[in-house]
Image: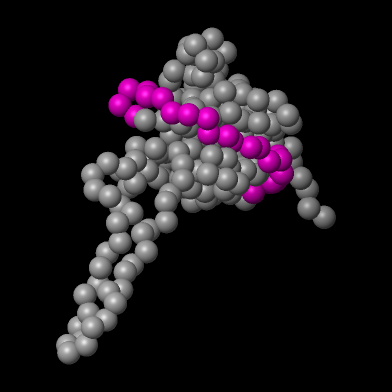
Amino acid sequence: MTTHTTVPSPITLSQALRQGAVALSLCSLAMLTACGGGGGDNSAPVVIPSTTTGATETPQTEPPAPATSRADAYVGTWRSICIPATESNLSFYVEAVATKVSATQVSVHNNLVGFGGLTCAGPVLSTGDNGTDTYTLTGTTTVGTKLVDQVILTHNSADTKSLAYTDGSTLLFGNTATGSAVDSNGYPTSLNTAYPFTRQ
């Protein structure tokens, strides 16, 4: 018989964000802009000249590359840092699997993986399904030198305004801890760098 140990303070990803405990960020718009904006006209067809002589042929063309949406940068599996619970000598991390719903929305399924000790090492004591959240990208803003997404995190019909940023391998959310600064629209004005997620 398998013994299941309860992971301390089981929370979904968005709940953790509200508490300032975990911060998942999502999209690097700076990267997407570099790929799809500015410079030349990326939609112009590329002409492949014919190598046949003595005959007239219609030039072949390559179709333009498909556009990359903001949501695409979020897609994948992400893992939080190890979160210790010193009072019970246990620890856990959040594993979040993000799938694209639309160009501005992703669905994120949360799992908690628990361990004995404080370092998320050794045998897994328990795993927990912590539901699925929806992340809706509503706009962009600048934090320092970073262009980041403004997002609405929806969990159990409750919405939380946050920020999202990724460089492709690391993800950060906005700082939503109680008392943190927000702008006139209610979005955080800083990123929570204490709790990054990494791409798996």
Considering every residue shown, the one lying at the far left of the view is: 53
Residue extent of the magenta highlight: 124-146
Q: Quadrant of residue 7?
A: top right
Q: Which residue does the image show at 43% across and 20% down from the upper left?
A: 190
Eyeballing the image, is 155 above or below 47? above
Q: Is residue 169 magenta?
A: no
Considering every residue shown, the one lying at the far bottom of the view is: 54
Magenta span: chief secondary structure: strand
Q: Quadrant of residue 165?
A: top left
Q: Is residue 78 visible?
A: no
Q: Which residue does the image show at 43% across and 49% down from the upper left?
A: 68
In the picture provided, is 117 more to the left or to the right than 199? right
In the picture provided, is 118 more to the left or to the right than 72? right
Q: Which residue does the image show at 49% across and 51% down from the upper left?
A: 200
Q: Which residue does the image show at 32% across and 43% down from the upper left?
A: 37
Q: Where is residue 114 shown, x and y percent of the image?
A: 65, 42
Split into 4 quadrants, where in the image is the N terminus? bottom right
Of residue 114 and residue 73, the one placed in the foreground of this image is 73
Q: Where is residue 86 shown, x and y percent of the image?
A: 60, 27
Q: Is residue 187 visible?
A: yes
Q: Quadrant of residue 167?
A: top left
Of residue 4 and residue 69, the one placed in the foreground of this image is 69
Considering every residue shown, the one lying at the far front of the view is: 56
Of residue 48 and residue 58, the one placed in the foreground of this image is 58
Q: Is residue 140 magenta?
A: yes
Q: Where is residue 191 shown, x and y percent of the image?
A: 44, 25
Eyeballing the image, is 186 above or below 74? above
In the picture provided, is 83 more to the left or to the right than 39? right
State the count of labels: 0
Q: Where is residue 34 shown, x and y percent of the image?
A: 30, 43
